[in-house]
C-alpha cells in the first residue's frame, strides 16, 4: 500500500512530528499533559449537572454490569467524541499551519495528518486509562473487554484520520471549511447519543411513525457513525458485554470506507498543495 510505504520511508520524520505535536499542546503549562483530562472532566461535570440533575435523563443501568452512574455512562461516549473532533479539527489546520514547511521541503504531506492523529491518540489513551481505573473503582469489570476496546480505538482513529484528510484538503482551497465544521460539530454532538440514550429517540420515533414509506426517524438517526461508536464503547466499558454485531460491523465499514476515501482524496491533491497554499 502506498500509504504504508510513504510512512515507512519517513518513520523518523513521523516520530519527530508526533513528539512535536504532543509537546506543543501543553508547552510551558504547569500541569502539562494533565490538561488533556481537564476538558473532558469539565464537560462531564457540566453535562451531568444539566442532564442528570436538571433535565433528569436516566439511562438504563449497565447490562449485565449493573452500573447506574450517569457521569461514568457519559464519559464512555464523551471521550471517543472528544478524540474524534480533536483529530478532525487538528487535521484541518495541519496543512495550513505548516504552509512554510510544505513550500520549502519535500516530504510525504500525509505525515502531518498522521502525526496529528497519533498525538491525539496518545492523549486519548491516557484519558481511557483514567476511565478504566474509575470503572474498576465503581465495581465494573472492563478488563476482559480491553482487547476489543483497543480494536475499536484503532477503528475510530482510522475513521477520524480519513475525515481529517478530506477536510484538510477542503480547508486548503476553502478556508471557510473550518468555521463550517465548527457549527456542524455542535449540531452533530446533539444528534449523537452522548448525553441521552438512544431509547429516547426510539420512543419519539415510534410516536411520529413512518415519515416516508416504512422509513422512520430512528432509521435516519442510526446512520450516524459516531452514534454507533458511542454504543459500542458503552457496551464494552459500561455494560461489560459484546457489542451489537450490526453496530460493530457498521463501525468497521465506516472506518475503512472513510480512511481509504480520505486517502484517495488526499493523494489526488497532494502534488498541488504547495501552489494552493
Image: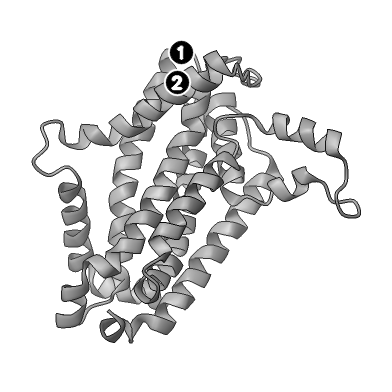
Work out which quarter of the rendered image holds the N terminus and state it. bottom left
Question: Disc 1 on helix, strand or loop?
Answer: loop
Residue 121 in percent (x, y) is at 34, 47
What residue appears at the point 59 percent right and 19 percent down from the top-left corner?
A: 55
Tag 1 and tag 2, C-beta contact below 8 Å: yes
**Structural distance between the alpha carbons of marks 1 and 2:** 5 Å
Note whether 172 is above or below 87 in the view shown: below
Relative horizontal placement of residue 13, taking residue 249 as reference (left or right): left
For the question of whether residue 53 can be seen, the reply is yes
Relative horizontal placement of residue 152, taking residue 241 as reference (left or right): left
What residue appears at the point 47 percent right and 62 percent down from the top-left corner?
A: 163
Q: Residues within 10 Å of mark 1 (few under 14, many from 20)?
A: few
Q: Residues within 10 Å of mark 2 (few under 14, many from 20)?
A: many
Between residues 36 and 108, which one lies in front from this camera angle? 36
Work out which quarter of the rendered image holds the C terminus and state it. bottom left
Relative horizontal placement of residue 189, taking residue 248 as reference (left or right): left
Identify the residue position indicated by label 2 in the image: 135
What residue appears at the point 64 percent right and 20 percent down from the top-left corner?
A: 64
Image disc number at residue 165 = none
Question: Disc 2 on helix, strand or loop?
Answer: helix
Residue 216 in percent (x, y) is at 82, 46
Relative horizontal placement of residue 91, taking residue 33 as reference (left or right): right
For the question of whether residue 157 can be seen, the reply is no
What residue appears at the point 40 percent right and 66 percent down from the top-left corner?
A: 176
Note whether 165 is above or below 198 in the view shown: below
Between residues 10 and 30, which one lies in front from this camera angle? 30
Color theme of the render:
one colour
Between residues 109 and 237, which one lies in front from this camera angle? 109
Residue 234: quarter of image? top right
Residue 124 in percent (x, y) is at 35, 41
Amino acid at each position: 500500500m502506498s500509504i504504508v510505504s510513504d510512512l515507512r520511508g519517513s518513520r523518523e520524520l513521523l516520530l519527530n512530528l508526533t513528539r512535536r505535536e504532543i509537546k506543543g499542546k501543553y508547552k510551558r503549562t504547569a500541569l502539562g499533559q494533565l490538561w488533556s483530562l481537564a476538558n473532558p472532566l469539565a464537560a462531564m461535570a457540566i453535562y451531568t449537572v444539566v442532564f442528570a440533575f436538571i433535565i433528569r435523563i436516566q439511562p438504563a443501568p449497565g447490562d449485565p454490569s449493573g452500573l447506574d452512574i450517569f457521569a461514568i455512562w457519559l464519559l464512555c461516549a464523551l471521550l471517543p467524541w472528544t478524540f474524534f473532533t480533536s483529530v478532525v479539527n487538528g487535521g484541518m489546520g495541519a496543512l495550513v499551519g505548516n504552509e512554510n514547511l510544505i513550500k520549502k521541503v519535500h516530504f510525504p504531506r500525509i505525515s502531518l495528518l498522521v502525526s496529528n492523529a497519533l498525538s491525539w491518540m496518545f492523549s486519548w489513551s491516557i484519558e481511557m486509562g483514567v476511565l478504566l481505573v474509575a470503572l474498576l473503582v465503581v465495581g465494573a469489570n472492563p478488563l476482559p473487554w480491553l482487547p476489543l476496546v483497543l480494536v475499536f480505538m484503532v477503528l475510530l482513529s482510522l475513521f477520524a484520520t480519513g475525515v481529517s484528510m478530506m477536510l484538510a484538503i477542503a480547508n486548503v482551497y476553502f478556508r471557510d471549511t473550518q468555521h463550517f465544521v465548527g457549527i456542524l460539530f455542535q449540531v452533530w454532538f446533539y444528534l449523537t447519543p452522548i448525553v441521552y440514550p438512544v431509547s429516547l429517540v426510539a420512543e419519539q420515533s415510534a410516536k411520529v411513525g413512518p415519515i416516508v414509506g416504512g422509513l422512520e426517524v430512528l432509521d435516519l438517526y442510526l446512520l450516524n457513525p459516531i452514534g454507533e461508536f458511542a454504543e459500542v464503547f458503552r457496551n464494552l466499558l459500561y455494560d461489560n458485554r459484546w457489542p451489537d454485531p450490526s453496530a460493530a460491523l457498521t463501525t468497521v465499514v465506516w472506518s475503512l470506507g472513510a480512511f481509504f476515501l480520505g486517502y484517495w482524496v488526499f493523494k489526488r491533491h497532494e502534488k498541488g498543495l504547495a501552489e494552493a497554499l
